[in-house]
Each structure stands twice: as structure tokens, then as C-alpha cells.
Image (cartoon, rainbow, N blue to C red):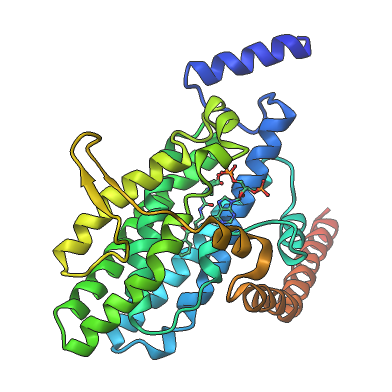
Amino acid sequence: MTVHSFQEHFDKKIDDEVMIEPRDWMPDDYRKTLIRQISQHAHSEIVGMLPEGNWITRAPSLRRKAVLLAKVQDEGGHGLYLYSAAETLGISRDEMLDQLHTGKAKYSSIFNYPSLTWADMGAIGWLVDGAAIMNQVPLCRTSYGPYARAMVRVCKEESFHQRQGFEIMLTLSNGTEVQKKMAQDALNRWWWPSIMMFGPPDADSPHTAQSMRWRIKRFTNDELRQKFIDVTVEQAKLIGLTVPDPDLKWNDATGHYDYGAINWDEFWNVVKGNGPCNKERLEARKKAWEDGAWVRDAALAYSKKRKARKENNKTLAA
Ligand code: BYC
């Protein structure tokens, strides 16, 4: 087949909703886009363990501690499935980690904000995992097979995460005045960063149009952001909290909430590395990588030793 017919075959598969698999021919830019998105998604999961990991030892009860521990462990698992999915496209895990540690690869802007109080664990689960689900459920139908399949399990776990966060917020909202205030303060601080998670507005999103054509993305950034706002505003009402947006207003004509201006300067500033916790997050990841060197060395030495022993046994048996 010529490159031209490979391309036609690929396009037809995309049109017919047939998933692309690792051994299939794919355009270079499709491969590059997937490596970029999946690896950044993986990094987000791993860096995303940090703001919540910060509260494991301070969770207010054994139950809360066990649940938070399980949630943070799930995020680690998501990172690992996603690194594996990206590896099927021909990039190694070492290369991806190097891109993260040298600041070449991005991770979600949201994790560069600090988690200051216990209520932040509620707000992160409710809003950040809520936004993640909104973005990731459509990714279960993304056109690249290994990514789509990884997302099925990730989404099941995220939906548990979202509910645990909402339940923390519900409990605090029904608690003392101080607890209710703490919940409102967490919503105030996490609301805008959460709606920025969906990425720049469509008009300023360089990748959306092509990714929609390739069916990597099924909805645009603005479409997902609107869906999230519509659902979440109702949930805030249910627990008696106020979304910190004075311009938020139901619009009968569109059937959606209108919302106020998003501070895109803040978003780009955080994406460029100047958010409140960017340096701290990257330092923590680099330190974990360096501190873990002996574990990787030991695992490699062990596997070499086992292989040598197996070879030796084979020779003796022959
Ligand atoms: N933060 O053309 P665009 C989680 C970058 S983890 C930082 O719209 P695209 C969780 C973008 O990368 C949640 N950077 O890009 C974990 C691009 O830069 P490059 C993570 C952002 O790819 C633990 C440039 O801006 N979820 O759920 O079409 C605990 C232009 O953007 C952000 C995923 O990764 C951002 N928010 O669309 C709890 C989902 N937004 O790469 C929860 C998978 C944009 O050209 N990813 N940028 O240098 C996606 O769906 C898409 O990649 C995005 C962006 C919607 C994020």
C-alpha cells in the first residue's frame, strides 16, 4: 500500500468508528497528539496525588483516612495505565518522565493550587474529579484503542472519587457554622481553577479542531466546561453553598447557565509554571524519582539474577 492508501484506510476507520490499534498505520501527527495528550494526562494523575497526599495523615477519622488513601492510590494506578497506553505509541516511560522532570511536558493546571484545609479534600473530589469525569467519559470512546480501554476503568474509579468528595462537602455543609464556612471557602478557591481545567476557550485552543476530526476528542473544551457548570451549580444548591460567580444565571433561551469571565491570564500563568505550587510539585516529583533510584536498581539486579539462574539451570539440565 502507498502512504496515500494507508491514509485513506486510516480515515475510513475513523469515519466508521473503528478503533485504531498500536500496530495499525497512523499519521505521524495523530501519534504525536496522542503521546502528548496521554502522557500529560498520566503526569496529571501522578502530580495530582500530591495535594491530597498532603492530607492523608490529617484526615479527621480512620474512615476518612482509609478512603482518602484508597483514592490517592487509585490516582497512582490511573497514571500507570496511562503511561502504559502511551508506551504502545513508541515512547518509553523514561522519556515521558524526563519530559515531566525537565518541564517540557505539561500536567493539569489544577494541581498547582494548594490544599489548605480538610474541606479542600471535599472540593477536590467533588469539583476536580467531577470535571475529570466530564472530560474523561467521552474519552472512553476516543479513537485510539488502548487509551479508550484505560479510560473505562479510570472513569469508574473517578465516579467513586467524585462521590466521596461530594459527601465530605455535604457533611461539612450540614455541620457547625465553622465547618460550613470551611466548605464555602474551599468552593470559593477551587471553583475557577476547576472550570479552567477544561483548557482554553475553543477559539484559543490550537489542538481542538484536529483532535475532534480524529475523534480523539469527542467534545470541545467549551462544550465540556458548560456541561460541568450546568451539573455542578445544581449540586452546590443542593448542599446550600454558593458558587463564587456573581454573573452566573440560568438562561432559558439556551437551556444552560451563563457564567462570568474566566481569568485566562491566571490560567496561562499557571500553565507556564508560575502558579502557587508549580515549583513545589515538580520538586516533589523529582525527589521521588531520585529517592526511588535504588528500588529501580534493585528490581533490575533481581531480574538479571533470576534470568541468569534460569539460564544456568537450563545448561545444567541439558
Ligand atoms: N492544564 O489546544 P488545547 C485528574 C494546554 S487528572 C495545563 O485545548 P488539547 C485527576 C494543552 O496541553 C486530569 N495545560 O489542548 C488526577 C496545550 O499545550 P501543549 C487531567 C493545559 O490537548 C488526580 C495548550 O494548553 N485530564 O483527573 O486539545 C486527582 C492548548 O490547549 C490545560 C486530562 O489530561 C490544563 N488544564 O486539550 C483528581 C484529560 N488545558 O500540549 C483528578 C485528557 C490545556 O500544546 N486531556 N492545556 O503544550 C484532554 O482532554 C486535553 O488534553 C485537554 C486540553 C482538554 C486537557
Q: Residue at x 42, y 47 (%)?
A: 135
Q: Residue at x 25, y 35 (%)?
A: 254
- In the picture, the quarter occupied by the N terminus is top right
Count of residue discs: 0
Up the image or down, 120 lies above or below 200; here it is below
Q: Is residue 108 visible?
A: no
Q: Residue at x 50, y 44 (%)?
A: 201
Image quadrant where residue 236 sits:
bottom left
Up the image or down, 283 lies above or below 13; here it is below
Residue 317 point in image, percent of width and height: 80, 57
Up the image or down, 266 lies above or below 288; here it is above
Image quadrant where residue 118 sits:
bottom left
Q: Is residue 150 visible?
A: yes
Image quadrant where residue 112 sits:
bottom right
Residue 269 point in image, percent of width and height: 62, 63
- Please give left or right for residue 74 compared with residue 267 in the image: left
Q: Residue at x 71, y 31 (%)?
A: 29
Up the image or down, 35 lies above or below 180; here it is above
- Please give left or right for residue 91 compared with residue 115 in the image: right
> Of residues 1 and 217, which is closer to you in this image?
217
Residue 315 point in image, percent of width and height: 85, 57
